[in-house]
C-alpha cells in the first residue's frame, strides 16, 4: 500500500511521529490540505495552527505546515492560504431564512435611514414585479430617520394599486398601503389576536402600521407561492448564507417549512446544515410533530447525503414567543417603561400555557426555545422551565434576553438553560431608544453577554436575520466592540459586557453545534470532525481590532467541498 510521497521520503522515526499525529492509516494521503494559514480552530487542545488536512470530508490532521505537507501525495489538492485567517464554518444560532427570501425578491430597506430612499426603492421594486404580485420585504427602521412611523399614505403616493406589506427591522410590525388594508378588510374596529394592534391615525383610521399579529388580517389573504418557487427561493437564501461564511443555522419557521428543506436535501442540493425549530404552543400539535421528525429523518437516511457530508437536517425543537420588542414597547418588563409610565408590556401567553407547551415538547424529545426580550418575560420563562421541563438530550433555551434581572442570570445556569443572544440587537439600539425605554438604572442589565459567561451559562450567538445582519463577521465585531453601527452614542456602550474574539468565535461555532446532537461532529477544526471551514479575505489582528469591519469571506467549505467562492 502506497505511503504519501512526503512520508516515503522521511526516516522511520519521523514517519511514526507523523502517523501518530495524523491519526489516519499510513496509506491514506489527504484529499485536501490547507497550509500557510492563520487557523483559529476553536479546539482548546490546539487553538491556533498553520495548517490542516482533509480526507473523505473530515479533518484528519491539524498542525504545522511541515507536518501537514507530509500528508500529501500527487493527487492531493493543496491550498496556500497566504496567511489569511481561517475559522470553522459559522453556525448562526437564530435565523429565519424563509422570512428573508422576500428581502431578495421584493425590497430590502434595512440600514437605510431616510424615508425618501425607502419610497424610491419601493417604486423600483414595483416596476420589477408582474401585475398582481404582492410587494413584500422590508427591514425599515423608523428610528434611524425622522423618528416617527411611516403611514399608508407614504406608500400610496408611489404604489397605490398593488398590495404592499413591509415588515420592520424587528419583524414585529408591518407597514402597508391602502390597497393592503382593503384586501384584508382592516378597519379601526377589526378584531386582532392577543398582543396585536391596528395603529390608528389622528382621524381614528388605520394608519398603515400593524403591530405583532395584527398582520394576520392581511397575511391570510396572501396569494400562494408555488412549491417550486418557494424551494428555489429558500435554496438561493441558503447560498446567500454560504457567501457570509455560514455552514450551519438554527432556523425557525412553521412546521411545514422543514419539509422544504427535506426536499432540497433529497435532491442533494443542501449547502448548509439546518437544526430546525417550529413555532407551536399547542401540546397536541407538538406531539403530532414527532411524525414529521420521523419523516424528515427517513428522507435524510434515504438521500445518502449523511454518509458523504455529515448531518444536514433535523426537526429539532419548538419555538414559543412570550413578548415583543423594546422598540415598540411590546417587550414585557418587570417595571414600567421609562418613557411610558403605567405600561410595562404584558406577556403574549400565560405561564401555565407556556409550561404546557414546554412539557409537551420535552416529553416528545423536543427542547424548547422561547423568545423573551424584557426582564419580565425572561423571569416568566425561567419560572415555566423550572415548573415544566423534563430531561431531554438537548438543552432548552431562551432567545434574545435583552434585559434580565441579575438574579436570573444564575438561574440560567441552575436550570441548564442556554442563552441565545444576538450582538447586533444591542449595538443597533445604541443612541436610538435603549436608554429611553429602560432608563440608565436598568442599562447594566441589558445585553449581558459577559455576565452569562461569567456565570457559566452556555452562550450562543446568532443574527435573528432578517431583523439584523446575517453576516457573522458583523455580529462578532458588534460583540467585541459594542459600538453603534450608525456612529451613534459615545463609543463602546457598557463595554464591561463585551466579549473577546475567541469567546465570540466560540459562540458562533462550537456553542451552536453543542445545542444540537452534532456537537461532536461539527463546530471546530478538530481531527475527526466534518471539514466545515471558512477562509476570510485577510488576516484578522490578534487581539482583534476594527479592521474586521473591512473583511469579507473569500471561500466557504462544507464537508471539505467548496460551497462559495468570492467572485
Image: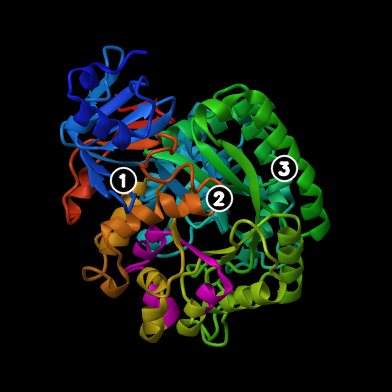
Q: Which residue is mark 2?
A: 516
Q: Nearer the viewer, residue 448 or 331?
A: 448
**Crowd tier of the residue under label 2, counting other residues whose Cα lies within 10 Å: few below 14, some 14–19, many 20 or above:** many
Task: Specify whether 473 is left or right of 327.
Answer: left
Q: Nearer the viewer, residue 500 or 493?
A: 500
**Is 427 drawn above or below residue 41 in the view shown?**
below
Spatial CA distance of label 2 from label 1 is 19 Å
Q: Which residue is mark 1?
A: 41
**Crowd tier of the residue under label 3, counting other residues whose Cα lies within 10 Å: few below 14, some 14–19, many 20 or above:** some
Q: Is residue 415 magenta?
A: yes
The span picked out in magenta is 411-438
**Crowd tier of the residue under label 1, counting other residues whose Cα lies within 10 Å: few below 14, some 14–19, many 20 or above:** many
Residue at image point 81% right, 49% down: 288
Task: Specify whether 78 is left or right of 205.
Answer: left
Quadrant hosting residue 342: bottom right
Q: Please, what secondary structure does the residue beneath circle 1 have?
A: loop
Q: Tell me if residue 548 can be seen.
A: yes
Q: Which residue is mark 3?
A: 293
Q: Please, what secondary structure does the residue beneath circle 3 have?
A: helix
Q: Please, what secondary structure does the residue beneath circle 2 have?
A: loop
Disc number lying in front (1 or 3) = 1
Spatial CA distance of label 1 from label 3 is 32 Å
Q: Find residue 171 and report its horizontal and vertical position in percent.
A: 54, 55
Q: Find residue 468 and report its horizontal and vertical position in percent.
A: 43, 52
Quadrant hosting residue 345: bottom right
Task: Specify whether 392 is left or right of 165.
Answer: right
Label 2–label 3 contact, CB within 8 A: no
Residue at image point 61% right, 27% down: 264
Q: Earlier in the sequence, mark 2 or mark 1?
A: 1
Q: Earlier in the sequence, mark 1 or mark 3?
A: 1
Amino acid at each position: 500500500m502506497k505511503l504519501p510521497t512526503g512520508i516515503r521520503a522521511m526516516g522511520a522515526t519521523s514517519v511514526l511521529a507523523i502517523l501518530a499525529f495524523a491519526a489516519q492509516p499510513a496509506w491514506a494521503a489527504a484529499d485536501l490540505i490547507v497550509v500557510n494559514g492563520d487557523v483559529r480552530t476553536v479546539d482548546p487542545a490546539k487553538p491556533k495552527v498553520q495548517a490542516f488536512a482533509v480526507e473523505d470530508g473530515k479533518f484528519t490532521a491539524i498542525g504545522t505546515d511541515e507536518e501537514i505537507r507530509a500528508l500529501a501525495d500527487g493527487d492531493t489538492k493543496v491550498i496556500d492560504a497566504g496567511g489569511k485567517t481561517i475559522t470553522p464554518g459559522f453556525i448562526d444560532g437564530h435565523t429565519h431564512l424563509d422570512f428573508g427570501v422576500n428581502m431578495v425578491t421584493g425590497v430590502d430597506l434595512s440600514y437605510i435611514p431616510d424615508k425618501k430612499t425607502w419610497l424610491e426603492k419601493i417604486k423600483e421594486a414595483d416596476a420589477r414585479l408582474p401585475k398582481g404580485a404582492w410587494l413584500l420585504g422590508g427591514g425599515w427602521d423608523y428610528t434611524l430617520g425622522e423618528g416617527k412611523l411611516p403611514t399608508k399614505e407614504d406608500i400610496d403616493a408611489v404604489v397605490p394599486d398593488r398590495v404592499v406589506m413591509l415588515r420592520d427591522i424587528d419583524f414585529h410590525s408591518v407597514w402597508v398601503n391602502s390597497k393592503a388594508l382593503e384586501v384584508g378588510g382592516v378597519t379601526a374596529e377589526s378584531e386582532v389576536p392577543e398582543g396585536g394592534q391596528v395603529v390608528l391615525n389622528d382621524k381614528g383610521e388605520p394608519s398603515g402600521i400593524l403591530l405583532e399579529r395584527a398582520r394576520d388580517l392581511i397575511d391570510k389573504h396572501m396569494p400562494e407561492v408555488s412549491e417550486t418557487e418557494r424551494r428555489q427561493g429558500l435554496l438561493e437564501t441558503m447560498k446567500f448564507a454560504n457567501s457570509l461564511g455560514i455552514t450551519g443555522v438554527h432556523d425557525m419557521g412553521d412546521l411545514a417549512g422543514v419539509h422544504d428543506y427535506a426536499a432540497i436535501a433529497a435532491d442533494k442540493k443542501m449547502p448548509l446544515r439546518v437544526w430546525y425549530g417550529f413555532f407551536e404552543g399547542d401540546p397536541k400539535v407538538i406531539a403530532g410533530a414527532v411524525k414529521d421528525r420521523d419523516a424528515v429523518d427517513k428522507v435524510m437516511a434515504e438521500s445518502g447525503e449523511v454518509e458523504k457530508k455529515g448531518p444536514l437536517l433535523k426537526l429539532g425543537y419548538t419555538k414559543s414567543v412570550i413578548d415583543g420588542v423594546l422598540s415598540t414597547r411590546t417587550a414585557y418588563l418587570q417595571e414600567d417603561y421609562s418613557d411610558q409610565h403605567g405600561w410595562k408590556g404584558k406577556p403574549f401567553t400565560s405561564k401555565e400555557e407556556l409550561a404546557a407547551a414546554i412539557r409537551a415538547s420535552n416529553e416528545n424529545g423536543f427542547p424548547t426555545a422561547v423568545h423573551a426580550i424584557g426582564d419580565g418575560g425572561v423571569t416568566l420563562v425561567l419560572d415555566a422551565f423550572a415548573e415544566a421541563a423534563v430531561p431531554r438530550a438537548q438543552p432548552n433555551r431562551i432567545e434574545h434576553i435583552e434585559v434580565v434581572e441579575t438574579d436570573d442570570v444564575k438561574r440560567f445556569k441552575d436550570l441548564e438553560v442556554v442563552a441565545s443572544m444576538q450582538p447586533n440587537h444591542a449595538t443597533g439600539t445604541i443612541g436610538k431608544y435603549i436608554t429611553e425605554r429602560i432608563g440608565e438604572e436598568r442599562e447594566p442589565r441589558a445585553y449581558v453577554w459577559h455576565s452569562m459567561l461569567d456565570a457559566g451559562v452556555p452562550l450562543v450567538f446568532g443574527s435573528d436575520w432578517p431583523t439584523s445582519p446575517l453576516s457573522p463577521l458583523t455580529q462578532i465585531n458588534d460583540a467585541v466592540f459594542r459600538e453603534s453601527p450608525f456612529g451613534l452614542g459615545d463609543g463602546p456602550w457598557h463595554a464591561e459586557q463585551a466579549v473577546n474574539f475567541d469567546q465570540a468565535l466560540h459562540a458562533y461555532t462550537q456553542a451552536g453545534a453543542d445545542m444540537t446532537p452534532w456537537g461532536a461532529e461539527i463546530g471546530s477544526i478538530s481531527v475527526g470532525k466534518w471539514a466545515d471551514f471558512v477562509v476570510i479575505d485577510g488576516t484578522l489582528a490578534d487581539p482583534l481590532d476594527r479592521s474586521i469591519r473591512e473583511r469579507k469571506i473569500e471561500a466557504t467549505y462544507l464537508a471539505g467541498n467548496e460551497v462559495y467562492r468570492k467572485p
